[in-house]
Image: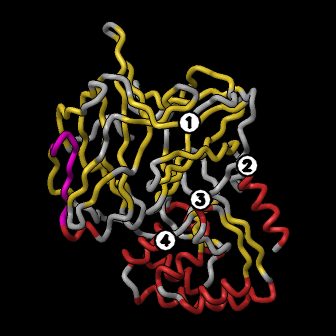
Amino acid sequence: SRLLAGYAEKCRSGGKETFTLSVLDLDGFSRIQAAFASSAASLDDMDLAEIAKAAAASISFGSGSHGSYSNLIDLGCFGELLGFQELTEAIGEYTQVENGIYHQEATGLSFFYPLRDMLTVKDYLPLAEESYRSFLEKHYTVTDGDWIEVTGAEEQNGMLSVTVSPESVSHIVESTYQLFWFETEGEREWVYGMGEDTDIVFDGENRYTVNFQGNWISFGDQYIHADVREDREAYTVFTSPMYVNGIQSEMRFVYDKATRTIQLQGYVPQGDAVGRIMDFAVGDQITLLYDDRNEYKENLKPGESFVYSEDTSLHIATLPEGYYQYTLWFYDIYGKPYQAATAVIFFDGSQVEIVTVTQDRFLTD
């Protein structure tokens, strides 16, 4: 425990609060395995949407490349949300854990659950415990069909508002919106994908409204491309692609929903499978990567470079006046994306005006 506490203090002193450090007592591992097998066997008697939402609500671990998911989630969180008492008690008895502020619910042991990228399931099956393998084979090897139906899209008070069928609500695990920026110079026009955000208001019935107010993230006085890595009730973890001293990396930062503040966590060099978060150092050469959509597909290109200093700030900033577009996306219990609707807007520096609303595909992957 002293060893864990020492490493935890090192993380905290560096401003990192999205960490989990744990030690497992191997003498008790067989009990955890048995409890997991018993829990997995009961999954077939439960509602799949409830299971998938519990997985999505659990803390995630691991590091994927730009736009990807590791599909590793905290086993104790998952068990707690589904009422697997034997499993959570076994994990609690045989693990010691130190967590950062944004990982307080983590229990120190993770497992594979296919939140996105169903192609990874077939690679995992030979390694899976028998009962859990049976569950995955039954529900996640064939995932054809549409589970979300959009029934309407309209402008409401300067925001895009979308309704879905009542049956669809239980199958929506996640919702995000993608933002695009139109920049013009004379007769030339550039289109940039700014990334995504989760500031979407659900009315508790079947309506989802995008709460875009003309703000985005700035780092080193430049607007960044931001992707959602993990969205929880209290906070959202974002990543942003960039070069750090010539090495392609992902910056990590946390948006605290209660305080509406942003905390820089550091960056992860590409290829680091365990997701070690490195600190930025004074003098680091930073080159942000931008999603150039002029060919109507994702294409990361380097922007201007700057040198990191003690004064370099990561903060929410007001976007320039101009035309933008955002698209609302839903993800179902199988991780399948659904493009719900798109709004083209004009932002005058203080107010958002919706120009058009459409459910046609436009400027998306």
Kindly identify which numbered label has been placed on residue 72. none
* Residues packed near mark 1 inside 10 Å, few (<14), some (14 to 19) or many (20 plus): some
Relative depth, front residue between 114 and 324: 324
Percent position (x, y) of residue 246? Answer: 72, 28
Locate residue 163 relative to residue 80 in the image: left or right: left
Locate residue 127 relative to residue 214 in the image: left or right: right
Cα gap from disc 3 to disc 1, whole angstroms: 26 Å
Residue at 47 percent across and 79 percent down: it is 81
Residue at 37 percent across and 74 percent down: it is 49
Kindly identify which numbered label has been placed on residue 70. 3
The quadrant of the rendering that contains the C terminus is top left
Query: Which of the colour schemes (rainbow, by chain, secondary structure, one colour) is used?
Result: secondary structure
Query: In this picture, which residue range is highlighted in magenta?
Result: 155-165
- Give the foreground label among 4 and 3: 4
Earlier along the polypeptide chain: callout 4 or callout 3? 4
Earlier along the polypeptide chain: callout 1 or callout 4? 4
Residue that badge 2 annotates = 14
Cα gap from disc 4 to disc 3, whole angstroms: 13 Å
- For the residues bearing labels 2 and 1, Cβ distance under 8 angstroms: no
Kindly identify which numbered label has been placed on residue 314. 1
Residue that badge 4 annotates = 55
Cα gap from disc 1 to disc 4, whole angstroms: 30 Å
Earlier along the polypeptide chain: callout 4 or callout 2? 2
Q: Secondary structure at mark 2?
A: loop
Q: Is residue 158 magenta?
A: yes
Earlier along the polypeptide chain: callout 2 or callout 3? 2
Percent position (x, y) of residue 125? Answer: 59, 73
Amino acid type for the residue under numbered disc 4 = Ala
